[in-house]
Image: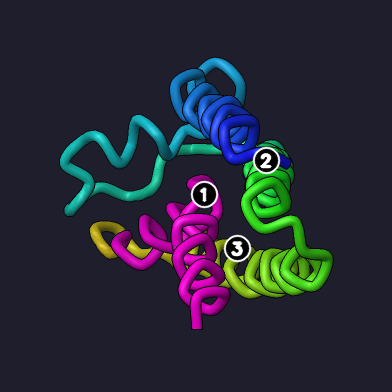
Amino acid sequence: MKNRVKIILIVILAFGLILIRQFEDKLFYDPLLEFFKTDHSTQPLPEMELYKLYANIILRYLLNTILSLIILWVAFGSKSILKLSALLFTGLFFLFFIAFVLLINTSAAGDHMALFYVRRFLIQPIFLLLLLPAFYFHRRS
């Protein structure tokens, strides 16, 4: 694939990730979005429908992962990179989702920073931001 086509595809796919972020409040049920925008340092977690929250976190992670894997495929065109990335995304999802469930069920009032950061890893394409340069530097060496 020519470099211009790759760049255009990556920009379009990145725009998809931006749209997910831009319309997160309309697309996904997540009462923690507003909660973490407030002074949450002394507040208990808001009332939530946990299964609905879990389903929406999973859906958002899945959408971000699909777009991220396509970006990695377009950028590198390697099955081995795609397989390793899919394995990493899956393993890290289970690790962070279990931590998220535990934290949301045991979080005390004002003690939410671990929940905030674990949730960030689940709802933002942070793994893509880590994997792109890692694979790029690996390819160069």
Q: Amino acid at mark 1?
A: Pro
Mark 1 Cα-neighbour bin, 10 Å: few <14, some 14–19, many ≥20: many
Mark 2 Cα-neighbour bin, 10 Å: few <14, some 14–19, many ≥20: many
Q: Amino acid at mark 3?
A: Val
Task: Report which quarter residue 67 is drawn in.
Answer: top right
110 vs 95: above or below: above
Q: Secondary structure at mark 3?
A: helix
Q: Nearer the viewer, residue 57 or 17?
A: 17
Label for residue 101?
A: 3
Is the Cβ of the residue at disc 2 closer than 8 Å to that at disc 1? yes
- Please provide percent x and percent y for residue 122: 55, 54
Q: How is the image coloured?
A: rainbow
Estimate the spatial distance between the alpha carbons at disc 2 and disc 1, rounded to whole Å. Answer: 9 Å
Label for residue 90?
A: none
Estimate the spatial distance between the alpha carbons at disc 3 and disc 1, rounded to whole Å. Answer: 19 Å
Q: Nearer the viewer, residue 115 or 124?
A: 124
Tell me which segment is drawn in magenta: 112-141
Q: Nearer the viewer, residue 10 or 52?
A: 10
Label for residue 125?
A: 1
Estimate the spatial distance between the alpha carbons at disc 3 and disc 2, rounded to whole Å. Answer: 24 Å
Q: Is residue 70 magenta?
A: no
Mark 2 and mark 1 lie on one chain; the one further toward the N terminus is: 2
Q: Name the dominant secondary structure of the magenta segment.
A: helix
**Residue 54 seen by the camera:** no
Q: Is residue 97 left or right of residue 121?
A: right
- Please provide percent x and percent y for residue 1: 73, 41
> Among all residues in the image, which is located at the extreme bottom?
141
Which residue lies at the image location 35% right of the left edge and 64% below the top edge?
108
138 vs 122: above or below: below
Mark 3 and mark 2 lie on one chain; the one further toward the N terminus is: 2
Q: Is residue 113 magenta?
A: yes
